[in-house]
Structure formats: structure tokens, C-alpha cells
Image (cartoon, rainbow, N blue to C red):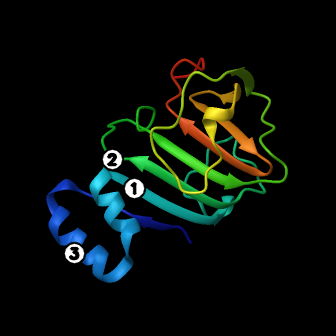
Amino acid sequence: MPRSTITTPLTLGVLALGALTLTGCSALGDVAHDRVTSEAATRADLDAAPDWLPSDARDITSVAGTGGKASDTTPTTLVFTSTDGVTDDACSTAPRQSAPTMDVDDAPDVYGADSVLRCGPWSMTSKGDRWIAWTPNPGDGGS
């Protein structure tokens, strides 16, 4: 079952104290940066997986900003492991012009990539079987 940490600016003080006492720095980071961090063991454990996410995706971390009003404008970064990789026919290769706005620990370095795989409003790259995908992707031909 996915684990989520939700943040709101109004409860910053209470959550910060509770985060330090109960869960450590991850929750405090979410509070300080207005984001939601979720983790899932497999694609099947996600509430709403993007169509392009491989069926063998595992060790998934999603970090989404809380400031966006619509799902297509909410900055989101997904990091996952997949041996099969992204093979959706709707995806195409494009020069990398964007980068994720939400950081995820242990994500592949997007700045080393000259090109990305673009799947609609998402861009992604990988190092071995570890992938990073982000939206919006201005300049990559997406959103």
C-alpha cells in the first residue's frame, strides 16, 4: 500500500515538531517545500499510474508539488526501477530542454542527458534500470 506524506502551510509548526519527533527529516522536508512524497513497492500499488509506466516498475517514489491547481500543472517527479523500461508507442525522443522541479534522492542525473523520452506532458531518462520522469516538461515539446 502506498505511503504518503501530505503538507499544508497552516500546520507548519505542529507538523515540523511532530516530523522531527516521529518520522525524521523526510516529513519535515515535505512541510518546508510544499510537496507530497509517496512511495510504492510496485506499479499495482499506485493509485493512478501514468499509462507509460512499465508494468514491472518497482521501488517507486513520487514527489509532487502542492501549489498546482490542475494535475497537468502540478510539478511531479517519479523515480522508479524497471528492467523492461518505458516502451509506450506514444512516446518519442526529443532533445532535453527541461529538468524536474521536484528533487528525489537517488534519482539519475538528468543534466547528463542530451535527450529524453517524451510521453505527452512527461519527460524521462534513465541510468541502467533506474528511471526519472518529470512533468511539466517545457521545451521538450510537452507541457
Q: Amino acid at mark 3?
A: Leu
Q: Residue furthest front?
A: 112
SS state under label 1 = strand
Q: Amino acid at mark 2?
A: Thr
SS state under label 2 = loop
Residue 70: image quadrant is top left
Q: Residues within 10 Å of mark 2 (few under 14, many from 20)?
A: some
Residue under label 3, please give it: 17
Residue under label 2, please give it: 66
SS state under label 3 = helix
Q: Residue at the spot x=51%, y=21% of the render?
A: 138
Q: Amino acid at mark 1?
A: Val
Q: Residue at the spot x=35%, y=58% of the render?
A: 30
Where is residue 76? Give x, y as percent: 48, 43
Q: Residues within 10 Å of mark 3 (few under 14, many from 20)?
A: few
Query: On screen, 108 above or below 44?
Result: above
The quarter of the image holding the N terminus is bottom right
Where is residue 43? Give x, y as percent: 67, 58
Can you tell which of label 3 and label 1 is closer to the viewer?
Answer: 3
Residue 46: image quadrant is bottom right
Q: CA distance from mark 1 to mark 2?
A: 7 Å
Left/right of residue 29 with respect to residue 128 in the rendered view:
left
Where is residue 29? Give x, y as percent: 35, 60
Q: Residue furthest bottom?
A: 22
Q: Residue at the spot x=67%, y=41% of the render?
A: 51
Residue under label 1, please give it: 36
Where is residue 17? Give x, y as percent: 21, 75
Q: Are marks 1 and 2 in contact (CB under 8 Å)?
A: yes
